[in-house]
Image: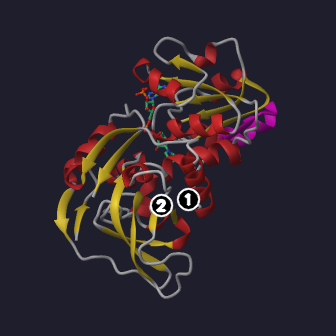
Amino acid sequence: MKAIIYETYGSPENLKLKEVNRPEPKADEVLVKVLAASVNQADGHLLSGTPFPVRFSSGLFRPKHQILGADISGVIERVGKDVTQFQVGDQIFGDLSGSGFGGFAEYAVAKEGVLAKKPKNLTFEEAAAMPMASVTALQGLRDLGKIKKGDEILINGASGGVGSFAIQIAKALGAKVTAVCSRRNADLAKTLGADEVIDYAVRNFTQEDRKFDLILDGPVNHSLNQIEPVLKGGGRYVAFGFSMEALMLGSWKSYRTGKKFATLMAKVKKDDLVLLATLADEGKIYPPIQQNFTLDEVPEALSLMKKGKISGKLVITI
Ligand SMILES: NC(=O)c1ccc[n+]([C@@H]2O[C@H](COP(=O)([O-])OP(=O)(O)OC[C@H]3O[C@@H](n4cnc5c(N)ncnc54)[C@H](OP(=O)(O)O)[C@@H]3O)[C@@H](O)[C@H]2O)c1
């Protein structure tokens, strides 16, 4: 099969299209014919091997898994003998990040728990745009953010992969949403449902005279001391981008202020994929796609993603 391979940590130029052996599913795995994939910042971190702690799981000196790609959609081609929830021919989508990646290839293997039936109303490309970003948004809002109907929510980094789903999920759950993004992406944020958009080049949301029940933060470009005054009493701050400060001092800051400061490490769950597929089929969320690439163009997609100015998602047709 064709796959995009990397053998050493580095930049997108390290990625090569090669012919490799098709993976063999274990007894509790399925073999998926991958029809589409999407690109996440996680792929970029694994490609570069940075920040350094990613290497504790991905290989200290060279990558343990040579095929990147977490988000996939496709058709089940074979099932292991212990698989109970899927059959050959099922159309699925899912996130392979917890099981060695491998999505930038014609075939991938996966355990049942990281896959769900593809939303019927979406194309394979649209479905592949969803798993990691939409699950992260859902778990940030619901599990750590304890979102409630009527909450006033601010999403920093609202036009990226995670943020664009967070706007839509928050609106579907009855919140009032303020989106922080560039002027270039203001129309996208409004189309996704934002009630208000703040252009970060013009206004600093931490210096405004208003408060929020929940702040969801991807760029993590403000300190906890700057964030705290714009949270209401009992308000919650959830960093989904990496925040050393929230990781180290979040509990202490929560104890001191009575507000909650947390970092999210999202984990794909079948039930969440099923819920998100239902929301997609009901037309409550959809994946905004900035650009479509082919398998041999994965290096270009990762170069573009590295610049951090994405509007929605980048998808790969395989
Ligand atoms: N915790 C987890 O489990 C988890 C899961 C997925 C992702 N992540 C992390 O979450 C972060 C975001 O991921 P993503 O997939 O949403 O990334 P993305 O698609 O690259 O989006 C990043 C967004 O940030 C916006 N942005 C850049 N500078 C900004 C600023 N100063 N203020 C506000 N927004 C700004 C950009 O919008 P403009 O172009 O409009 O500037 C862009 O749309 C990454 O660090 C990623 O590694 C964590």
Image coloring type: secondary structure
**250 magenta-colored:** yes
Q: Which residues are magenta?
A: 249-263
Q: Which mark is residue 304?
A: none
Left or right placement of residue 61 versus residue 166 in this view? left
Label 1, label 2: how far apart the Cα atoms are: 8 Å
Residue 312: image location, x then y, percent: 42, 37
User: For mark 1, what is the residue?
Assistant: 268
Residue 290: image location, x then y, percent: 35, 36
Query: Are the two marked residues, 1 and 2, in contact with CB atoms closer than 8 angstroms?
Result: yes
Quarter of the image where one finds residue 305: top left
> What's the magenta bit mostly, secondary-structure-wise?
helix
Quarter of the image where one finds residue 101: bottom left
Looking at the image, tell me whether mark 1 or mark 2 is earlier in sequence order.
2
Q: Name the residue located 57 percent from the left edge and 29 percent from the top edge.
A: 193
Looking at numbered disc 1 in the image, what kind of residue is underneath it?
Val
Secondary structure of the residue carrying numbered label 1: loop
Secondary structure of the residue carrying numbered label 2: strand
Quarter of the image where one finds residue 104: bottom left
User: For mark 2, what is the residue?
Assistant: 94
Q: Name the residue located 36 percent from the left edge and 55 percent from the top edge.
A: 37
Towards the viewer: 273 or 296:
273
Q: Name the residue located 46 percent from the left edge and 54 percent from the top edge.
A: 53
How packed is label 1: few (under 14 Cα within 10 Å), some, or many (20 or more)? many
How packed is label 2: few (under 14 Cα within 10 Å), some, or many (20 or more)? many
- Asked if one can make out residue 255 in the rendered structure from this viewpoint, the answer is yes
